[in-house]
């Protein structure tokens, strides 16, 4: 551990958000070291009922090397084949490996070459296998046959990192996007237009991400980006979106700049004040303990940035940070940190980390017969936390929507995944992507024109006022200018008996930063 007093004052550009940080992406730790502590990074068979993370699905075109639309097979030699229909990958498959995910038919995009996007197009032949980096996949949702629609498709882009530890953590996002696209098309599309989604994997490479965004816009006619997971690459893409006035629905939380961009329409808490308050609200609404030890990762600058925010705002929440220090998400054990935190008088351990690290940290404390309150943010609202068993019982966290694990309001999300992407990964980030799709549905009346346009999407979002998306989020609006305070609310969660539960009922209640008030339409 690097002690707080020894932390460098240099600031590297923020690359990813807490949500993910911490899947290990952007890490400077070698894959071999991560595998020793996080498990194999290769695809592993698992039961479909386990909601294991799935590879990013597409429908016929290769993202990083040509794939045959006829066979779905990669032309670069491929790799080991993951489980077929009825199975799910235990982690996002390595590049070059194929995996099938059951579901409806999909067709091929003409795009090809390194990073080339692949479309979920209306109609098409039988579904094809998928590779981890975004080749063809069965289970990709399809729009209705274009012959039955007089209107042009609304084309959306969804891309980010689809492999490695980070890909495993964000796997619920592309699954939710696919499920939402299939579901909305069965109900007539958006404003009568069928929905077509273009997927790609940027591999965590900023230059590749920008090239993908440009290709999607110029070559595929993407009107907006939606359900993205550019957790390390958003800073490279955001200036292009702003220059070209291309809206992005939701946020990958890859940069605090997204919270203040005029082209980002995010219904959930973002990576700036929202994430910081999600930590504090998860604790202060569910515990009377206020003496806190904060442990934050050394692999990514965003970890230190989140700690700096906590240090700045903690007094406002009545929280006393009595100990802080860096650690590595590749450590197999955190005994030294736990002993130091206990000696400093900490009652709570707040970890800016991923679920596997949280689990190892709790186990390290319990081996010393120390049982503090463990608290985290919405990054913990994932199925993989269940691997911690009794060691994570009582863990405090938060949800950025009503909880997917208990709320009837998100049953349509779970039903759509079960129907269109059976065995697909589910989690809080997937529920957030589903809510972003519902945000698009809410402005459907602005999209009835032919052809649909970006200005009509922007006008639709500008019209919203105190919008809750049917209770999925607190009242929101998207005023002109800074949007860093559009949503500073989360639903507190406690891990009990194998799943996160909110206090006070299945939906829980949104708890917000002091003084927060819903933004008003301008």
Image (cartoon, rainbow, N blue to C red):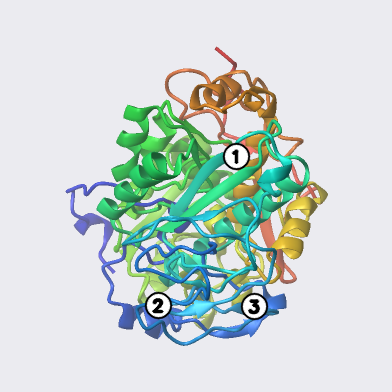
Q: Which mark is residue 69?
A: none
Residue 325 visible? The answer is: yes
> Which one is nearer the viewer's eye here, 217 or 95?
217
Q: Tell whether 187 sits left or right of 150.
A: right
Q: Quadrant of residue 344?
A: bottom left
Mark 2: which secondary structure?
loop
User: Which residue is depicted at the point 46% across and 71% down?
Assistant: 68
Front of the two marks 3 and 2:
2
* Camera sees residue 288: no
**Between 280 and 192, the one nearer to me in the picture:** 192
The alpha-carbon separation of the residues under discs 1 and 3 comes to 46 Å
Identify the residue shown where x is 63% and y is 35%. Answer: 440
Percent across and percent down for residue 303 are: 35, 54
Within 10 Å of disc 2 (Cα), the crowding (few <14, some 14-19, many 20+) is many
In which quadrant is the N terminus drawn? Answer: bottom left
Residue 487, image x and y in percent? 56, 33
Q: Which residue is denoted by mark 2 in the rendering?
A: 96
For mark 3, what is the residue? 389
Mark 1 vs 2, N-terminal side: 2
Residue 278 in the image: x percent, y percent? 54, 45
Q: Looking at the image, which residue is at 69% across and 24% down?
A: 445
**Can you identify the residue that label 1 sits on?**
153
Badge nearest the viewer, 1 or 2: 1
Left or right of residue 308: residue 448: right
Count neighbours of disc 3 (C-alpha within 10 A) and say few if under 14, some if 14 to 19, many if 20 or more: some
């Amino acid at each position: 551990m690097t002690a707080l007093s020894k932390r460098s004052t240099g600031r590297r550009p923020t690359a990813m958000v807490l949500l993910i940080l911490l899947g290990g992406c952007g890490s400077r730790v070698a894959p071999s070291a991560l595998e020793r502590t996080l498990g194999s990074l290769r695809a592993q068979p698992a039961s479909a009922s386990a909601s294991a993370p799935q590879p990013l699905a597409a429908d016929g075109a290769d993202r990083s090397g040509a794939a045959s639309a006829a066979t779905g097979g990669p032309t670069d030699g491929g790799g080991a084949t993951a489980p077929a229909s009825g199975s799910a990958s235990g982690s996002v498959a390595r590049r070059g490996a194929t995996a099938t995910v059951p579901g409806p038919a999909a067709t091929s995009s003409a795009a090809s070459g390194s990073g080339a996007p692949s479309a979920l197009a209306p109609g098409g032949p039988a579904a094809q296998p998928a590779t981890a980096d975004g080749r063809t996949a069965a289970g990709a949702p399809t729009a209705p046959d274009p012959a039955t629609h007089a209107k042009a498709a609304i084309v959306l882009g969804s891309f980010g990192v689809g492999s490695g530890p980070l890909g495993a953590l964000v796997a619920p996002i592309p699954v939710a996007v696919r499920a939402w696209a299939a579901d909305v098309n069965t109900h007539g599309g958006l404003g009568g237009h069928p929905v077509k989604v273009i997927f790609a994997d940027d591999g965590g490479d900023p230059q590749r991400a920008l090239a993908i965004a440009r290709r999607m816009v110029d070559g595929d006619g993407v009107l907006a980006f939606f359900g993205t997971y550019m957790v390390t690459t958003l800073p490279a893409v955001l200036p292009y979106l702003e220059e070209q006035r291309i809206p992005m629905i939701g946020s990958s939380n890859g940069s605090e700049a997204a919270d203040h961009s005029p082209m980002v329409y995010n219904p959930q808490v973002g990576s700036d004040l929202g994430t910081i308050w999600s930590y504090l609200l998860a604790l202060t609404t569910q515990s009377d303990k206020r003496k806190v030890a904060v442990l934050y990762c050394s692999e990514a600058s965003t970890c230190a940035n989140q700690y700096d925010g906590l240090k700045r705002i903690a007094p406002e929440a009545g929280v006393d940070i009595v100990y802080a220090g860096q650690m590595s998400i590749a450590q197999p054990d955190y005994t030294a940190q736990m002993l130091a935190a206990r000696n400093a008088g900490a009652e709570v351990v707040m970890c800016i980390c991923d679920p596997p690290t949280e689990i190892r940290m709790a186990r390290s404390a319990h081996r010393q017969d120390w049982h503090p309150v463990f608290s985290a943010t919405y990054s913990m609202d994932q199925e993989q936390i269940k691997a911690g068993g009794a060691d994570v019982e009582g863990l405090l966290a938060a949800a950025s929507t009503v909880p997917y694990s208990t709320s009837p309001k998100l049953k349509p999300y779970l039903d759509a995944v079960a129907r269109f992407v059976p065995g697909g990964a589910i989690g809080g980030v997937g529920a957030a992507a589903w809510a972003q799709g519902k945000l698009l549905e809410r402005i459907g009346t602005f999209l009835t024109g032919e052809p649909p346009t970006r200005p009509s999407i922007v006008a639709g979002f500008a019209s919203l006022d105190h919008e809750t998306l049917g209770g999925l989020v607190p009242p929101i609006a998207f005023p002109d200018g800074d949007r860093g305070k559009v949503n500073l609310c989360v639903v507190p969660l406690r891990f009990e008996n194998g799943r996160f539960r909110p206090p006070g009922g299945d939906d829980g209640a949104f708890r917000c930063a002091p003084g927060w008030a819903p933004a008003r339409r301008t």
